[in-house]
Amino acid sequence: MSELTFEQMLEESFKTIHTGEVVEGTVIDVKPDQIILNIDYKSDGILPKSEYTNDSTLDLTTQVKVGDKLDVKVLKVNDGEGQVALTYKRLVADRGSKRIEEAFNNQEVLTAKVAQLLNGGLSVIVDEVRIFIPASLVSDVYEKDLSKYADQEIEFVVSEYNPKKRRFIGDRKQLIVAKKQKAQEELLAKVKEGDVIEGTVKNVTDFGAFIDLGGVDGLLHISEMSWGRIEHPKKLFKSGDAVKVMIKEINGNKIALSTKFDDANPWKDAAVKYAIGNVVTGVVARMTEFGAFIELEPGVDALLHVSQISKEHVEKPADALKIGDEVTAKVVDFNEENQKISLSVKALLTQDDADDADVADVDVEAVAEEADAE
């Protein structure tokens, strides 16, 4: 037998490797876009950044250092330049695929940073496996603009796992729905009608505001925002405002709210302030064909019938008054049960009995019926 040459002995001292094999290497050099590893083979292994990560902005020198051990997969034993082409991200992806399969089977909640905003949803990466979350599964409400999720960490479950087609679908919506359902059950178990709690304005509409009570929304209708008149809910509230609300009604999982607290009810001492015969001052709030409504204070309006505006004949209120005018008049009728007050300027201008009789001749019930019709 002939003696082996030095080169032959040296080559035999190296292990044999094959494409697809997983080997352990030691980092002998690292650059921003490339890692060189000693894999105990006659040639060094080359690991480019594109085979280390999907993040093109990553600087490899911040990830590994000389002397680090790294498991890699062999892509080519000879890359054409006598070196071994390696991949790290595909090995991680293979392992990650198994990790995703386990999460899918167990409905495990995963957390990952949003890697990319797409036209139809979001993309996240878990162990180098790219998971797509459709826009319809991002939230329990439609969100046209998904930009707020950029670079945000989000929780989701894997709702579809198909490694053959490399199709991995995530679902965030079901977690939000389940969380809200639990919060709703917990809230409804501890509150009752009449309770006063703190909330945060979530959304303001033409008809009211939705208040977040701690994961559960309640509706504060415009009619329950104030004892006084409101032009628009946005005049009083904006998203993010902290607000104290009273639970007015609970109907199944629907909660109606109010900020009309009894201690601020302007009618609680109205019988004294607006007793018949008292002289009061208010502002013309609105007008009809039969009279003007005078706001005596927020939440308390009184009717000044067209026949009581002046001693002279007034055909319609707009002939003598306009919105915003200050009016001083005498209270000629007070109905606490129906919260109705009737005023007369004529009574102040008339001193003799005949004129007083004219005031008395006003059919208060008829006036009330006209006001109700209005």
Image: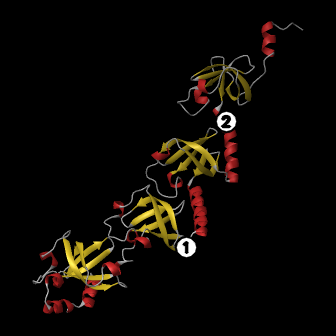
Q: Quadrant of residue 253 in the image?
A: bottom right
Q: Quadrant of residue 283 in the image?
A: bottom left
Q: Residues within 10 Å of mark 1 (few under 14, many from 20)?
A: few
Residue at horizontal 38%, vertical 69%? 226
Residue at horizontal 64%, vertical 33%? 89
Q: x, y percentage for residue 261?
A: 44, 70
Residue at horizontal 57%, vertical 53%? 172
Most foreground residue, 151 or 29: 151
Q: Is residue 253 above or below residue 346?
A: above
Residue type (three-letter) at the residue carrying disc 1: Gly
Q: Quadrant of the C terminus?
A: bottom left
Q: Where does label 1 land, which residue?
A: 252
Most foreground residue, 246 or 111: 246
Q: Where does label 2 land, which residue?
A: 92
Label total for image: 2
Q: x, y percentage for residue 49?
A: 58, 27
Circles 1, 2 touching at the beta carbon (< 8 Å)? no
Q: Quadrant of the N terminus?
A: top right
Work out whether mark 1 precedes mark 2 in sequence or the reverse, and give the earlier one: 2
Disc 1 on helix, strand or loop? Answer: loop
Residue at horizontal 33%, vertical 73%? 299
The colour scheme is: secondary structure
Most foreground residue, 96 or 282: 282
Q: Residue furthest left?
A: 312
Q: x, y percentage for residue 200?
A: 47, 58
